[in-house]
Image (tube, rainbow, N blue to C red):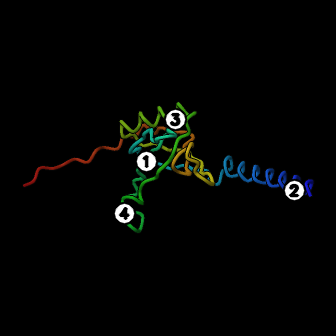
Amino acid sequence: MKKFFLITLIIILIVGAAVFSFLYWGVYDEGIRAGTVLRISRKGVIFKTYEGQLNLQSFGAMKSGSPFMETFDFSVERNMDQVIKDLEAVALTGERVNLRYIKRFIAFPWRGETKYYVKAVERTDTVIPARQSFPAH
């Protein structure tokens, strides 16, 4: 009976480690999103993570018309120092960028708030002009 319990426990631990590894390192989706970076910030109480938001600028192409549907929330892993610097730079300039990202199965709190992790920033050197206000007549 003791041997059966030990073998069952080892099998459960191996299966649990395999499932955790798959969920932690597995990549569900890879892609590129284009737009302007609205914000990049370091957030968290216990786990400090980098979180950002990209304005997709679909100009009403989405059916709902909601501005929340036209943004892309993403996280950046801590070891991606150059990506964080590039995101901070383009957030200040309003430059249009392409973000290469991966989507993981689960968001772990020490990695970020979202399942989307930016891996590279491709600068396009296109600055989107700010909206101009016109005087009222």
Sequence-wise, which precedes: disc 4 or disc 1?
A: 1
Q: Residue flagged by tag 4: what amino acid is it?
A: Ser
Inspect the image, locate mark 3, and give the three-letter code of the amino acid beneath it. Val
Q: CA distance from mark 4 to mark 2?
A: 56 Å
Quarter of the image where one finds residue 12: bottom right
Question: Secondary structure under badge 3?
Answer: helix
Q: Residue at x 53, y 45 (%)?
A: 112
Report which residue position mark 1 lands on: 53
Residue 83's label in the rendered image is: 3
Residue 120 in the image, given as x and y percentages of width and height: 55, 39
What distance separates the C-alpha of mark 3 from that of mark 4? Answer: 29 Å
Quadrant of the frame with the C terminus: bottom left
Instruction: Write down the residue under mark 4.
Output: 66
User: Which mark's residue is nearer the viewer, 4 or 2?
Assistant: 2
Answer left or right for 72 relative to 93: right
Residue at position x 58%, y 33% in the image: 79
The numbered mark, 2 or 1, whose residue comes first in the sequence reads: 2
Residue 89, quarter of picture: top left
* Distance from Cα at disc 4 to Cα at disc 1: 15 Å
What element does badge 4 sit on?
Answer: loop
Mark 2, residue position: 5
Q: Residue at x 41, y 45 (%)?
A: 36
Which badge, 4 or 2, is on the more N-terminal residue? 2
Mark 2–mark 1 Cα distance, whole angstroms, equals 49 Å
Indicate the position of residue 34 as horizontal and vertical percent values. 47, 48
Q: CA distance from mark 3 to mark 1?
A: 14 Å
